[in-house]
Image (cartoon, helix red, strand yellow):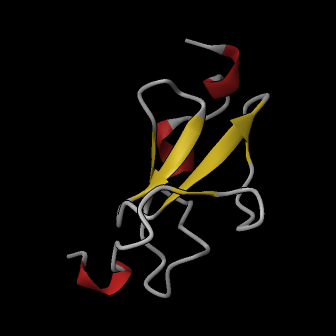
Amino acid sequence: MSSSSQSLEPWFLELLACPGCEQRHPLTLSESKDALLCKCGRYSFPVRDGIPVLLLEEATLVNPDAKPEEVA
């Protein structure tokens, strides 16, 4: 496990939600364990030193065409 994901336990990830989606979609840890991805596919949030940075100013817009309201 990389140092960036050491504190991201599954129970903790279940508490997090995307601050950019009105539906507050859950976030999942990326394969590289250095980012949290919104379920809608629109945003990626960095994880720095094991701490998720859930600020839209810090997010990467992965897919600007994704429509959060269309995610089941």
Residue 34 placed where, x, y %?
60, 31
Q: Is residue 4 left or right of residue 33?
A: right
The one nearer the camera, 16 or 64, is 64
Task: Give the residue at the far top of this rendering.
Answer: 1
The vertical placement of 62 against 29, above or below, is below
The one nearer the camera, 16 or 49, is 49
Q: Quadrant of the C terminus?
A: bottom left
The one nearer the camera, 60 or 28, is 60
Residue 32 placed where, x, y %?
49, 24
The vertical placement of 8 against 24, above or below, is above
Q: Quadrant of the N terminus?
A: top right
Residue at (53, 66) in percent of width and height: 17
Residue 46 placed where, x, y %?
67, 43
The one nearer the camera, 6 or 22, is 22
Q: Is residue 1 left or right of residue 40?
A: right
Residue at (62, 26) in percent of width and height: 5
Total numbered badges shown on the rendered structure: 0
Task: Give the residue at the far left of this rendering.
Answer: 72
Residue at (43, 84) in percent of width and height: 23
Quadrant hosting residue 4? top right
The vertical placement of 56 against 5, above or below, is below
The vertical placement of 65 against 32, above or below, is below
